[in-house]
Amino acid sequence: MSSIAFPMEPSGSASGSSRDDQLFASHFGTSSSFQMNPLSSHPPRSPHVSLISSASSRPQHTNFTGDIYSDGLDPVAVEAASSSVEDMDPEEERVKGAEDNVKVAEIWREMILTSNGRDKSFKLIQYSIRLYLFFHTGITTSRFLSSRVRPPWEAPLVTRLDKAASHFSFTRKLLLLFNWLSPLTAIMSQQTASLSDVNDSKKVAPKPFLQAALEAPPPVILELVNAVSDDVATLSRLGLLGRKLGERAGRFSDWCWFLSTLVGLVENSLERQVVVNLQREVESRLYDESMSGATAKSRPTVSKIDDKQLSRLRNKDYWLQISRAKLVMDLIFVSYELFKIRRGREPIKVFTGFAAAILSSAKLYNRHKTTLVKNMLAG
């Protein structure tokens, strides 16, 4: 049977696969007359890996494949890696380097220096003990283990842990003394700002403090009243005030805590709605830009700014969700205190208090970490 002569076929070719490869290379190689339409809105892209050249049973030809193909690398992956290196912002590299240099011990040291940080640390210890005691008493009172012989050191240990948890709770109340100075300063600064807006030529008497306090935002007023009632209850436990007055102040403080938690949830939902709307706008802009045919190398500066803004918005939305979860835990905890709910009182209060301690500590930890990173970048 006579063989069919293919165009551009070298003499002495023995294998059919090599003929196919050479024919493919002669028609679709780098020397082909195919040209990209200059009026096309899509920029030229790197070629994909050929199925013929990537097969292990077929030889590779230098006139068709380059160094990338001979090394067995995907050109798309190589292009993505090179573009990610080129597009990397030096400022992001500095921030990542500073975050890696900040140690966990340094962050906790900065937290402990503040009364709020010590409060969160003691709260973690307190509710960790409460959680252990809850599981310990739940196991030892079960029918399966009720008949076992307990070691002599177990009962004194449980008693000491219970006292330690109570002492940590009282220590936290002492750390929160004079917390009303913060909202009081905010009200006084607002009063000073209102006086500075008036013309200097006119002598206007300052507003009374009660009027300035009533004109302050509701969260500030709730924080002020809550802190004052907390201090009255703490002074009563110290023996400086009567017990009945301390109990009434404690209950009034719980009501203020309940109302401030509800206000915080409303503010959190409104702020998160704004952040989510901004996030959707940025995502829609990035999607429209990606559908227009722009690649990683041809993206303008505006798209990079949108990427940074989207990252910030996602981070803010994440911490808003953490704050909302913490507020929900506080609402459940204080509801059991106010309405004297008996069903599941002990486990729910333990678990909600422990969860609130973790979430609030995480927020404060991130705040101090961000401060240390900014100081390191500024230095």
Image (cartoon, grey):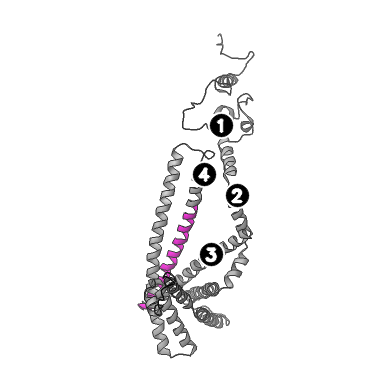
Give residue 287's quadrant in the image: top left
Residue 364 vertical placement versus 170 (above, below): above
Comparing labels 4 and 2, the label whose residue is closer to the camera: 4
Question: Which numbered marker is on residue 301?
Answer: 4
CB under 8 Å between callouts 3 and 4? no
Secondary structure state at the residue bearing disc 1: loop
Counting residues from the start of the chain, the first of labels 3 and 1 encountered is 1
Report whether residue 354 is seen: yes
The secondary structure that most of the magenta stretch takes on is helix
Foreground of the two, 374 or 187? 187
Comparing labels 2 and 3, the label whose residue is closer to the camera: 2
Q: Is residue 143 left or right of residue 156?
A: left
CB under 8 Å between callouts 2 and 3? no
Image coordinates for residue 339, horizontal then vertical, percent: 35, 77
> Residue at position x 61%, y 70% from top?
109
Residues under labels 3 and 4: Cα distance? 30 Å
Residue type beneath disc 1: Val
Which residue position is annotated with label 3? 367
Residues under labels 3 and 1: Cα distance? 48 Å
Q: Residue furthest left?
A: 339
Residue 251 vertical placement versus 45 (above, below): below
> Residue at position x 43%, y 47% from top?
283
Question: Which numbered marker is on residue 90?
Answer: 2
The N terminus lies in quadrant: top right
Residues under labels 4 and 2: Cα distance? 14 Å
Number of residue marks = 4
Counting residues from the start of the chain, the first of labels 4 and 2 encountered is 2
Residue type beneath disc 3: Arg
Secondary structure state at the residue bearing disc 2: helix
Counting residues from the start of the chain, the first of labels 1 and 2 encountered is 1
Which residue position is annotated with label 1? 49
Residues under labels 1 and 2: Cα distance? 33 Å
